Amino acid sequence: MGATERRGLWMIWLTLAIAMFLAIVSMPAGLEDYRPQWVTLTLIFWCLTLPERVGVFWGFGTGLTLDVLSASLLGQQALGLSLVAYVTVKLHARIRLFPLWQQSFFVWVLLLAERLLTLWILGATGQPMPALNYWVPSLVGLLLWPWLSAVLTQVERRMGEH
């Protein structure tokens, strides 16, 4: 593995670690319902950008780490992120052809699928069903995608320069 590949690997790890931090950091009570699915969005970006390097195993490992950090049922996030990574890698060639605003709708569907799978797990484990504001982070992710994608694209380009 060359120096550029190692640096790229560290940048992927770093962006996912920052996304995990943003996913667990405390927020004011009124804004907690609007917290985007940072980890899922970041994983989708890397699966679209580097599908030969970031895929299902990255989703599973990231999900397990997020399960531990957020004290959720072990495997809950891992299952959702693995599914998102799989679908993204399978369809990356098609999705990359679309303009960013159209990619946002694909990302929104993936965010909804991940939330739906998490909702199913909550129901299967007998936990109470969340209120309707459970779906708000997916909508925030839809609106946030073009900006997050632009920022992570700059990170990815800097990775390739060195």
Image (cartoon, grey):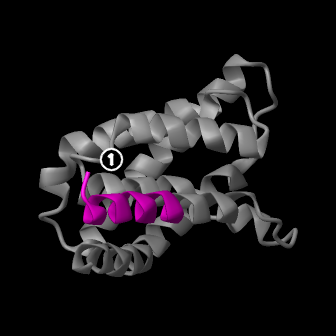
Instruction: Verify whether residue 8 appears in magenta.
Output: yes
Q: Is residue 104 left or right of residue 138?
A: left
How many residues crowd mark 1 within 10 Å: few (<14), some (14–19), many (20+)? many
Which residue is pictured at 20% across the width and 51% down the height? 92
Image: magenta residue range: 1-15
Front-most of residues 65 and 127: 65
Q: Is residue 64 above or below residue 138?
A: above
The amino acid type found where label 1 is placed reads Val
Q: Outermost residue, right direction?
A: 29
Left of 52 or right of it: where is 109?
A: right
Q: Which residue is mark 1?
A: 54
x, y percent for residue 121: 64, 25
Residue at 19%, 57% in the rendered image: 95
- Asked which quadrant contains residue 154, the reply is bottom left
> Residue 19's image quarter?
bottom right
The one of 44 and 31 positioned closer to us in this rendering: 44
Q: Position of residue 80 (x, y in %)?
A: 51, 36
Q: How many marks?
A: 1
The residue at the point 38 percent across, 54 percent down is: 44
Please determine whether, in this image, residue 46 is positioned above or below residue 30.
Answer: above
Towards the viewer: 61 or 3: 3
Main SS of the magenta part reads helix
Residue 11 painted magenta: yes
